[in-house]
Amino acid sequence: MREDTPDDSLTRAPIPRRTIALTGADGFLGRNLVGLLEDDDRVGRIVALDVEHPSTAGRKTRFYKVDLTQPAVDARLAEILHAEGVDTLLHMAFLASPTHHGAWAHELESVGTMHVLTACRERPVRKFVLWSQTLLYGASPSNPNFLPESHPLEAATQSRFLRDKVEAEEAVGRFARQLPSTLVTTLRLAPILGPTVNNYVTRYLGRRLVPTLLGFDPLVQFLHEVDALAAFKLAVVRDVPGTYNIVGDGVLPLSTVIRLAGRAALPVPHPLAPGLARALWAAQLSEAPPPFVEYLRWLCVADGSLAARELGFRPAFSTREAVLDYASAQHLRDARLLRPLPPAVPQSAP
Amino acid sequence: MTRRVLGDDPFASPEPETPAEGAARKPRARRSTNPPPAKTAPKSPKPSLPPPAKTAADTAAAPDTAAAPGPDVAGAVRMLEDALERVLAARDTPEAREALGRLSSKLTPGAGALAATQDPQRGGELARDTGDFDVARELFNTSYYLRQWGRVAMRDRFEEVDDFGYDARYEARWRPLFDFLYDRWWRVDVEGIENVPSTGPVALVANHSGALPWDGVMLAAALRKEHPAKRQVRWLAEDFIFHFPFLGAYSNRLGAVRACQENAERLLRSGACVGVFPEGVKGLAKLYAERYRLQRFGRGGHIKLALRTGTPLVPVTIVGAEEASPNVLPSGFLARLLGVPYVPLTPTFPWLGPLGLLPAPSKWTIHFGEPLVLDEPPSAADDEVLVGRLNERLRSTIQGTLDRCVAKRRSIWRG
């Protein structure tokens, strides 16, 4: 397990043990990060904030039941931040998949972020890390093949699911300008794929017939779940304020991804697609609302070179390896050798 | 004997696998509940991410999480090994072979079909053993066709493409057609190919012509066939082709890149040979009467790019493409109706149907001029006056070569 020699660890200066707080600690990222941080001796205490107790919590973790959709949650959060002496706050209370409960999602993501930031203004933390997504750039025919971090977030007009997240990121940007003493790191993650993660992308590729747009084959980009966690760990360990695209190496045409996943594409002519997507979404038969059809048509691929330079993040899995790793687990699920992924249910319905 | 159905649980029937069933389920089920960080530990290639330092005290303090699965896994592995040994010992019996084939076909799509092709007698045995009903059931099972599809679906593509979506295997499938057009149909002559440097970034600035843009494909074929370094050309394609179904996806896989400053700069910084057609759609849409008259050279984006990246510009003139598929009728009204920049109206195209897309066998000449190295600092890219002047100089160079080549030509068909 250990890479550094005993001598190395002896000469190393003692590092003060930090307290790390996570919102959304029972989400996929939160749960696994709690497990990772439990093993890290630089972390003294983990403060898990969610409505459910994360199953990975160990002896270092202290769980607080916090519902970000409640009106007075900011005072309670500030109280917790103060009582625990929180050094770094990871804000990850976002939905990984679109939901039909749009109003509740808005309360959780947009308003919930406001509450978290209010608490951080009342009782400042040293570092604030935000989970964001490269999807927020929006898929558009005028996108360059690799979107830099400076590109505007244009997805806000397309979908409510994405608009809430854009609002959250903008609020965090304002917070970073107003409180320069707090290090704010925003990680924009590419869609996550891997053997254990369950989100709308894995369910989309898990279909026997995967709907695509006839004649359109955009290049897509994925991030392996292990790399996603590694990026957050890096952001916790290193002090690098700023916004970073966290993406896997390489791109693949969507059709190749579907073939590598062992699926067959079901091409739909693009003039029919919005109506069909609306009908399927209304019937709760699809993974994502109609605006996501744009991502099957146009490019939305981000440039991860800044994260490599500044954050030192190098993905262990390329896009292709992430797809293959996901596919090997999915094949086992298909043959009922692994427990199938549960369908999409919001963790707490309104 | 138990009934065997190919679509069922692979571990259901024969004896050799029965002990493996429990063994196989356990570690896999464990994997699904385990957090993925367990996977990072053996890989851990990142020096930046120090692995969780586990001291003896740590493991002692949390024995229920770390130590408990240990003997379970070892036992499972041992059981799997035993099962495998038994299978290997009995692999010559048809039952075992069939069971193995079914197992692998379940786990990897197409592998079962592969096993079937390797063993021609298997099909016969299968029918005898399982009965017609099961064969029919197999054929009506969708996963059978998905497996077959998984086998053939990747035949025309690589599992990896480059950053801009170029797929070498896909291009190789089209290469015979391009070679035929290059060698036999248009009998392309190339002049001055030595003006293209063998290494480093270079932008080939060419005139655009013909209702169907074959000139880009032939420019790439010329570099591939005639240049000593066999350089690959990446064309910067107009936005509009990416709005069409099929056209954008296929040209992207052949190496076209959407024309914008960010893409071109990234390509040139990686040392690529970029093909630029500054006239854009205006060059394609112009009528036959205006043949070999260069249109406006964009807004000088290619000059700014060359200034910023210090790239030499090679002026390229392509003669013959105008006659291959000439635009004979103005298409303004029809184009507005269809919402496209122009509609190719050649002497043959809409009138003869798809057959009309066949280009005329004119004689082509591709001339590469002296490279134009801009001795200006990168900041000069913001000087609009300078950019305009350089752009005009490049345009007149290409127009001059075009006029000379067209005047020298005695016949459209024979050169």
Image (cartoon, coloured by chain):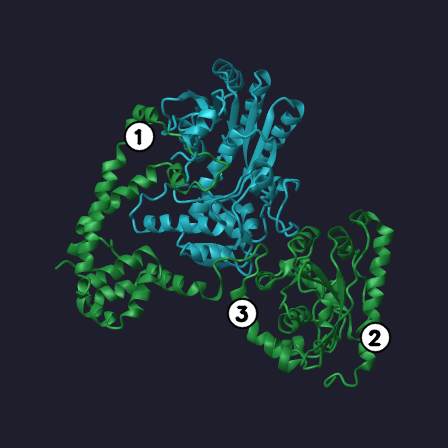
Chain A: its colour in the image is cyan
Label disc, if present, on residue A220 of the rendered structure = none
Instruction: Pick whichever, B339 or B271, lies toward us.
Output: B271
3D distance between C-alphas at marks 3 and 2: 35 Å
Chain coloured green in this rendering? B
Which mark sits nearer the N-terminus, 1 or 3?
1
Q: Secondary structure at mark 3?
A: helix
Are labels 3 and 2 on one chain? yes
Q: Is residue B181 visible?
A: yes
Q: Amino acid at mark 3?
A: Ala
Q: Residue at x 69, y 60 (%)?
A: B238
Packing grade of label 2 (10 A; few <14, some 14-19, many >=20) is some
Which of marks 2 and 3 precedes in the sequence? 3
The amino acid marked with disc number 1 is Thr
Q: Which kind of residue does numbered mark 2 sit on?
A: Asp
**Mark 1 vs 2, N-terminal side:** 1
Q: Residues within 10 Å of mark 1 (few under 14, many from 20)?
A: few
Q: Do labels 1 and 3 touch, CB within 8 Å?
A: no
